[in-house]
Amino acid sequence: MTRSISIFGATGSVGLSTLDLIRANRADYSVVALTANGNCDGLTRLAREFEPEIAVCADEKAYPALKEALADTTIETAAGEDALIDAAQRGADWTMAAIVGTAGLKPTLAAIEQGKTVALANKESLVSAGALMMAAVERSGATLLPVDSEHNAIFQCLQGGRLEQVRKITLTASGGPFREFSLEQMQTVTPEQAVAHPNWDMGAKISVDSATMMNKGLEFIEAHHLFPVGLDKLDILVHPQSVIHSMVEYADRSTLAQLGSPDMKIPIASTLAWPERVKTDCQPLDLATIGQLTFEAPDEKRFPAIRLARDAAAAGGARPAILNAANEIAVAAFLGGQIGFLEIAALADKVLEGYQPQTPESLAALFSIDAEARQYAQERVQEVA
Ligand code: NDP
């Protein structure tokens, strides 16, 4: 029997890795929806190969080209945010949520509401709307499987015990390309340097997040929602080799860790097959060649994003959404050459200080806070630029 799947963010790094795994076992899957933003050529190529029911581009400007490129096929085409939501509502058995940023929130929620399995890479949506999203999972009975390598590792380690037996969860962090840089050196780093991650091959935004360690901060908040053990039981440990993807310590002081080569296909494959296992063509873990695994505490002076995220998680309410929105604007401004690398976290800090709305009780309230935080952050970018 084939399994129906949809991939949101199909043209991105996680989307393409997912499709590599599907390609290897093509006959096992039927594809419902593939989506992109404006990369019409990439989406067209994938649609021709995987023959989804529907191909959707979020950017409406890309629609005429997409429609024309697939006119000789039976594949439906559509564009815009509502079309993404409609595609999610088609209710594939398994949906990969791999749009980058809060743009992924509505389609991810729509997929969750179908009560099927959702593999979640789009961490920003959980950071922004964690409580609302986890409530939707509870309500719909959906199975939410974490794709982020750290959370996937924790999820796997938790198969060895129960949440209430956990003493500590340790999220490991590579430390990014600037782990050994002084603040002075970090002042002049370029977007090209920031996106060149030493271990992982990822999209531009998450690569910059890894370089500032905001990625670990966002993952800290993500873990808080996925594995509610309490913030005092969540820890971050720098582990430059990215071999141990995270660890869970139990009450008896047994610690379980999940290890693997730094290849996103491994956690993605685990969500695709769960609760079974599938073969992948990923590199085996060769510990004798790696030789040494090292660890160090994160330096929150050089990487203040970790503290910002920890404080936002502790304060709750709108704080994580504001942090996430400000960071998205700041990263885009850094990639666009408008602000320096160190100004990313500084800008997020300023927005958190200057904009303090009430706790959002609904999705509409959350979106309005997200929009206001972006506007406020954009104004700060103009001041700095
Ligand atoms: P990429 O930038 O490589 O890909 C992003 C995808 O989202 C593309 O398909 C892009 O389409 C689409 N997209 C971008 N903007 C929008 C929008 N406004 N509306 C709809 N679709 C949009 O990102 P990654 O694959 O690296 O990351 C995806 C998510 O997974 C992120 O949340 C990231 O944090 C998370 N993640 C990524 C990991 C990785 O190794 N890459 C690891 C763990 C988590 P288009 O190509 O047309 O621009």
Image: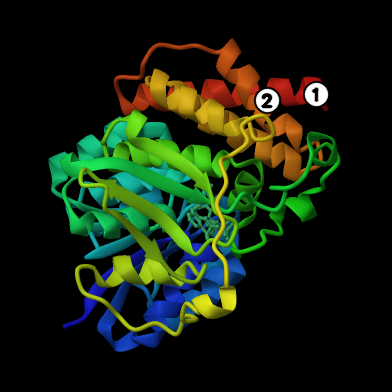
Residue at the (40%, 11%) spot, across then down: 358
| Residue where numbered disc 2 is placed | 347
On screen, residue 33 above or below 373? below
**Residue 225 visible to the viewer:** yes
User: Where residue 370 appears, x then y in whole percent?
Assistant: 49, 27
- Pick whichever, 80 or 133, lies toward us: 133
Give the amino acid at mark 2. Answer: Leu
| Residue where numbered disc 1 is placed | 384
Give the amino acid at mark 1. Answer: Val
- Pick whichever, 108 or 356, lies toward us: 356
User: Where residue 380 appears, x then y in whole percent?
Assistant: 71, 21
Secondary structure state at the residue bearing disc 2: helix
In the drawing, does residue 104 fall left or right of residue 130?
Answer: right
Quadrant in the picture for the C terminus: top right
User: Where residue 119 appears, x then y in whole percent?
Assistant: 32, 58
Residue at the (23%, 68%) spot, across then down: 274
**Mark 1 nearby-residue class (10 Å; few <14, some 14–19, many ≥20):** few
**Residue 65 visible to the viewer:** no
The answer to whether marks 1 and 2 mark residues whose Cβ atoms lie closer than 8 Å is: yes
